[in-house]
Amino acid sequence: MFVAFWLVGCDGANWNNPYPKAESGANILYSSFDARPKHLDPAVSYVSNEYQFIGQIYTPPLQYHYLKRPYTLIPLAAAKMPAVRYFDAKGRQLAATADAAAIAFSEYTIEIRPGIRYQPHPAFARDKQGKFLYHALNEQQLASIYTLADFEKVDSRELVAEDFVYQIKRLAHPGLHSPIFGIMSGYVVGLKDYATRLKQVRDEETTGLQDKEGYYLDLRQHPLEGVSALDRYRYRIRIKGKYPQLQYWLSMPFFAPMPAEADRFYSQAGLIKRNITLDWYPVGSGPYMLTVNNPNLEMVLERNPYFEGEVYPGEGEPGDAEAGLLNDAGKPLPFIDKVVYRLERETIPYWSKFLQGYYDSSGISSDSFDQAVSITTQGEPTLTDDMREKGIQLLTAVTTSTYFSGFNMRDPVIGGNSRRARLLRRAIAIATDYEEYISIFNNGRGLAAQGPLPPGLFGHRQGEAGINPYVYDWVNGRAKRKSIKEARELLAKAGYPNGINKKTGERLVINFDTAASGPDAKARLDWWRKQFKKLNIDLVIRSTDFNRFQDKMRNGTAQMFEWGWNADYPDPENFMFLLYGPNSKADRGGENGANYNNASFNALFDKMKNMDNSPARQKIIDQMVEIARRDGPWLWGLHPKAFSLHHGWVKNSKPNLMANNTLKYKRIDPMQRAEQRKAWNRPITWPLWSMLVIFIALILPGIISYRRKEHGTGGQG
């Protein structure tokens, strides 16, 4: 026993380390996931927990610059930014400055970088005669196949323009149901008809087949009018009208290349039955490849041995150099060899392992917020002493999201564009203290909104130029909410002195529709009542289930409501359309939940939406924001702040809330991590030694007595 204790104590490894000893000091990043990714097929996936993986695996034409703000698109698989040409309805080319109304078609020509190669994969493996080894597997060959790793041979090939065309065609595949097909079919020339034609082909070719699951629809045999390969490294996308937002879509996995070999390989019924599919095993050309997919335990990304040609950026925004974010400028990517994601369903175990150094980064849950962060008297977040002693770093960023409460502009009391209604909404906006809301319910993690556009987007104004003058004053270099006294004065001008309707003598009652319910929502809803109480207005909370709430929104019967929006792409059009009249939810089923309809705003939106970013576009945006602030269809709400923690051995961490492929920029110091883990997790062995001493003390008298007895017996004999 003594030898066993001694050996354990001299081993040098932490007893509670959840990772193999062989990984100590290895260039491995440790992270987690809390739910199984449902789709890893880039034509289907559209969820953040899936992009966590496929963003590192696939290489769309474009990407967001890691460091620059506002968010800026740069080439990824593309050799340069797409070339765009405009044409009128008669096919005549127009100038780049042509009015959007005159543009019938836009053509995007994308040139990709030569030399990009796919990860090693059995779909590319061939025999000596050049025939694919695994594209027609029989039952005998499949007998020993359980995972992708069971295939003996793998190979690779160069990425070509036709692979991008093939993937765009897949958006219309009748068996995939891509979530962006509806949007893209309205822009990509011929895509809607292409989907109809593919369905007809599939139905005809599968008629009479007993096993339709293994049917392969070869999209190479079916041309798509609006998308074609020009040569090995160039392809063209033709869209209807002018739609500059297409470039943002070109940064998403939907437009990443897909080799036809992979589609053919994964279409085999025998592989589908074994769950060896594109949804389970991606095939990409990015810096990493998925080598382990065990959603009940872990998922593992490893460096793609064929990835090359990309380096760490050499420029950013002010302050990046001082923060050390340019120290690796020009060095080849990626820096990390392997990433291990462990399943963690609960936040408390994850948090404990992060503090022990077994996870490299962490978010901050409400349960651990006070342990990690303290708020200064100026309202700024800072790390607690315990976190600073561990060398942990806090990173914050305002998200490209907005959460707001809206007024139904069709409502006879709170809606409409009369002076009375505008003053009423403005009084409520002043009284609703979102700074207090952020402090109480978000742990200070948010920024009170001044309009529809969050920071980081073109069109958002900072400082005094960006405040909402109807709700805030600019005082000592900061936005200060107007006083409740001013709100009451506005309420009186609206015809409700002290909250009483002058015409009826009754107190004003406003209905607040929400899907929130239960104990967790009670405190927040009580807070809402308190805000209206400042104006002596009765707020009636009408809680219901989400489906019923959605019905009210669709029917336009809600009076006030809660809503939110996360950016699909960082363009002002993606937020301004939430206030565009023809996008009314009640009238058109759109995303304008407030049913706001201002002719001047609508006209400016029509002009602005397809403009390139420029001073002229900024001027129009400023006009639109002013109109919306004056009319006040929303309580402008808040933009949440994302908080994250990183250990000191994690380098190049900067929040980028639009990019989904940032893993390649991260670097770690594995030796520093190993030393810190050892220091933070020294085993407490004295209880074991005490138990050993007690054990010896308990059995020693018995041993002595037994030996004496044996000795005495031996003497008598």
Image (cartoon, rainbow, N blue to C red):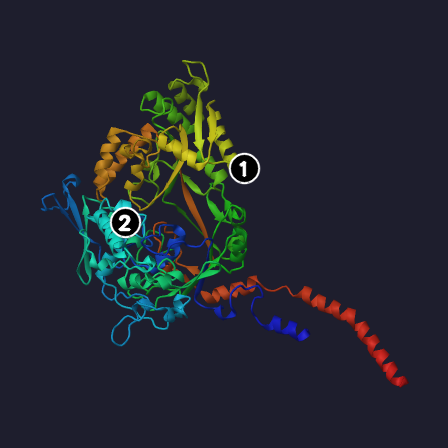
Instruction: Spot the residue most to the right.
Output: 716
The disc, 1 or 2, on the residue closer to the chain's N-terminal end is 2
Q: Residue at x 46, y 66 (%)?
A: 670
Q: Which residue is mark 1?
A: 519
Classed neighbour count for the residue bearing mark 2: other residues with Cα under 10 Å, few (<14), some (14–19), many (≥20): some
Instruction: Identify which residue, 311 or 227, lies in the foreground.
Output: 227
Q: Nearer the viewer, mark 1 or mark 2?
A: 1
Q: Quadrant of residue 637?
A: top left
Q: What kind of residue is marked 2?
A: Tyr
Q: Residue at x 75, y 71 (%)?
A: 696
Question: What x and y, as percent, mark residue 470?
Answer: 35, 29
Instruction: Identify which residue, 685 or 506, lies in the foreground.
Output: 506
Q: What kind of residue is marked 1?
A: Pro
User: In screen coordinates, is 97 left or right of 168?
Assistant: left
Q: Secondary structure at mark 2?
A: helix
Distance from the alpha carbon under mark 1 to that under mark 2? 41 Å
User: In screen coordinates, is 554 left or right of 688?
Assistant: left
Q: Quadrant of residue 693?
A: bottom right
Rendered position, 356 above or below 528: below
